[in-house]
Structure formats: structure tokens, C-alpha cells
Image (cartoon, grey):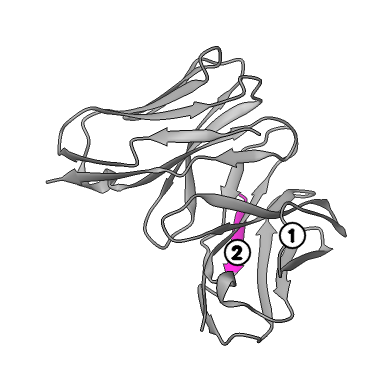
């Protein structure tokens, strides 16, 4: 059974800090990995998608890396802002239609 | 551009009542469609997915069913709701071959 784990479950940092969120998966034969953001009571917003052949993707202050051999992905957020406060989830795709989600990291950026 | 509509946003239903949640996708054809449930403080659980009209796959046995009467319409139903059906329900779609997932805004269901 494929499992996706996100550590830490919650994180509180002062504004301006750089931070790293972690996602680990048990089976390295992934198709792709996607990072999402979820605000309270809202749906998930896609942040970054990394194909299995890629090692990283960047969008603005966000950078996601993928290391299939170690079963890990990290989401790096530079110069964090209070508006970054949300829950961040990763999802791994192993084959057609099969998305496996982690339970998320709840981030609080303090002004 | 593609958009996904999900309604209602909030629903309060008594135990034993029926349920119908609807989701439609615009701007794309032949999408894969998904229903997820998110319990408070927990991850997403895949309930159903569909690769075409009338084609539904269920991931877990439960009190719910799904239907896809049109290419871009996905419906989640129940004949009699249970307390344990309470949760946040999310519809999602993806393009085949890309497998990038896009979510609707969700429905918060409270069964009392």
C-alpha cells in the first residue's frame, strides 16, 4: 500500500523566514507529484507539479524538489509572508487515476 | 480556460435524508472526474473516480454512490445519510495523460 507522509503536521514561523515542508512516499515508482495549498473551508489550489523525470519546479517564491530514489519531495518557501498561512498538501500519482495524498502541513506565518 | 463548479457550498441534512451533490467542469472534454471526502483535520479520501460517461469506480465501500450522466457532470448521491457521512466533499478533475488535479471549492456537509 502506497503511503504519503508529511512532516511536520504544523509549523509556525515569523514573517520573512525561509522554510521547508517535507513529503515522503513509500514507493519510488511515481508518475508525478503535485503540491497543493488549502485555505480553511476551501478547495485545494495547485501550486506545483513535478513529473517523474524532473528534479524540481519553481513558481515565484516556491520551489519544489523531487528525489525519487529516497522517496522524498520538499516544498521550499522563500521569504514567507502572512498570506502564505494555509495547509499545504502533497499528492503522489503512481499510475492512471491514482492520487495519494498526505495529511498536510498547517503553516502559520506570524506578522 | 477550464473551470469547475461545485454546489452547494454548505449543506445541513438530517440523518436518513437523501443527498445529491453536483459538480460540472467547463472548458475541457473527456476529463477524469473524482469525488474526495476530507474529514476534519485529516487527509483526503478518494471516494469515486470516473474516466467516462457511465463509468464509475469506487475506492471504498460506503453509503454513497456516484453517477456521470454527461461528459462533464459528476453527481454524488446517497439514499439515506448517516452521521458518519459528515465532512468536506471535494470534486476534482484531471486531463488524461497529464494527471494534474484541479479541485472545486467544496461542499461542507453536516448530518445531524
Which disc, if any, is residue B82?
Answer: none
In-image side of B95 versus A107 (left or right): right
Q: Nearer the viewer, mark 2 or mark 1?
A: 1
- Quarter of the image for residue A9 reads top left
Check chain identity for marks 2 and 1: say if they share one. Answer: yes
* Residue topped by disc 2: B5
Q: Is residue B3 magenta?
A: yes
Residue located at (71% from left, 41% from top): B95
Q: CA distance from mark 2 to mark 1?
A: 26 Å
Location of residue A21 in the rendering, given as x and y in whole percent from the top left corner:
35, 31
Query: Mark 2 belongs to which subunit?
Result: B
Q: Is residue A18 magenta?
A: no
Location of residue B13 in the rendering, given as x and y in whole percent from the top left corner:
56, 84
Which disc, if any, is residue B61?
Answer: 1
Q: Front-most of A48 and A66?
A: A66
Q: Front-most of A35 and A58?
A: A35
The residue segment tinted magenta is: B1-6
Residue B39 sits above or below residue A32 on the image: below
Residue located at (60% from left, 39% from top): A100
Location of residue B97 in the rendering, given as x and y in whole percent from the top left corner:
74, 32
Q: Front-most of B52 and A10?
A: A10
Residue lying furthest right in this view?
B54
How many marks on residues? 2
Location of residue A20 in the rendering, given as x and y in whole percent from the top left corner:
31, 27
- Quarter of the image for residue A13 reads top left
Which is more N-terminal, label 1 or label 2?
2
Would you call the spot at circle 2 few (<14 residues within 10 Å), some (14-19), or many (20 or more)?
some
Amino acid at each position: 500500500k502506497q503511503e504519503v507522509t508529511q512532516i511536520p503536521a504544523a509549523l509556525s514561523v515569523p514573517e520573512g523566514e525561509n522554510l521547508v515542508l517535507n513529503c515522503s512516499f513509500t514507493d519510488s515508482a511515481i508518475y508525478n507529484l503535485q503540491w497543493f495549498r488549502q485555505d480553511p473551508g476551501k478547495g485545494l489550489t495547485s501550486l506545483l507539479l513535478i513529473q517523474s523525470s524532473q528534479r524540481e519546479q519553481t513558481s515565484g517564491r516556491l520551489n519544489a524538489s523531487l528525489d525519487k530514489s529516497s522517496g522524498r519531495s520538499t516544498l521550499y518557501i522563500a521569504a514567507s509572508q502572512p498570506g502564505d498561512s494555509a495547509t499545504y498538501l502533497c499528492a503522489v500519482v503512481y499510475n492512471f487515476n491514482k492520487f495519494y495524498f498526505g495529511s498536510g502541513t498547517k503553516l502559520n506565518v506570524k506578522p | 480556460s477550464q473551470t469547475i463548479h461545485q454546489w452547494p457550498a454548505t449543506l445541513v441534512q438530517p440523518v436518513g435524508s437523501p443527498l445529491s451533490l453536483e459538480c460540472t467542469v467547463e472548458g475541457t472534454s473527456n476529463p477524469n472526474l473524482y469525488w474526495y471526502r476530507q474529514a476534519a483535520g485529516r487527509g483526503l479520501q478518494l471516494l469515486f473516480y470516473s474516466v467516462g460517461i457511465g463509468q464509475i469506480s469506487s475506492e471504498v465501500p460506503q453509503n454513497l454512490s456516484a453517477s456521470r450522466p454527461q461528459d462533464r457532470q459528476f453527481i454524488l448521491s446517497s439514499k439515506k445519510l448517516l452521521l458518519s457521512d459528515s465532512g468536506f466533499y471535494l470534486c476534482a478533475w484531471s486531463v488524461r495523460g497529464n494527471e494534474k488535479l484541479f479541485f472545486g471549492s467544496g461542499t461542507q456537509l453536516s448530518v445531524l
